[in-house]
Image (cartoon, rainbow, N blue to C red):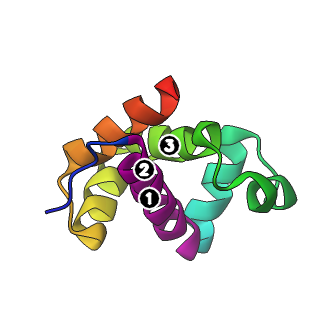
Amino acid sequence: MARADTNEDATALGLRALVWTLVEPDRALRLLSVTGLDPRDLRARAGEPQVLAAALAFLEAHEPDLIACAAALDVAPDALVRAHRELEAA
C-alpha cells in the first residue's frame, strides 16, 4: 500500500482522491456543494493544497466514501487522513 509521507506524496494522493471523487456525478456535485467551489474554480485550482485538503476532508466526513476511495486507490484509509493533515499544514 502507498504511504503519504512527504508533501509530494500527499499532493499526489490528494489529486488521485480528487479524481476518484469527481468520477461519480452525484458525489462530484456533493463535493462542489460542500466546498463551495464551482467547476471552473476547481479546474483552475485542483493542484492547490487547500483544494486537495478540502477534497480529502469531504471524503473523511463520509466514511463509506473514504473507505471506497482508499480501496480504489489501493491505500489505507489512514493514508488519506494523513495526506489531508499534511495538505492542511502546507
Q: Earlier in the sequence, mark 2 or mark 3?
A: 2
The amino acid beneath tag 2 is: Glu
1 inside magenta stretch: no
For label 2, the residue is: 8
Q: Residue at x 46, y 44 (%)?
A: 56
Choose mark 2 or mark 1, whichever is in front. 2
Taking the spot 39% from the left edge, 47% from the top edge, the residue there is: 10
- In the displayed structure image, the side of residue 32 where residue 12 appears, left or right: left
Point 65% across, 45% down: residue: 48
Q: Residues within 10 Å of mark 2 (few under 14, many from 20)?
A: few
Looking at the rendered structure, the kind of residue marked 1 is Ala
| Mark positioned earlier in the residue sequence (3 or 1) | 1
Q: Nearer the viewer, residue 1 or 38?
A: 1
Horizontal and vertical percent for residue 44?
Answer: 80, 57
Question: From which residue to which does the magenta span run?
Answer: 7-23
Q: Are marks 2 and 1 in contact (CB under 8 Å)?
A: yes
Residue for badge 3: 58
In the displayed structure, does residue 36 sit left or right of residue 90? right
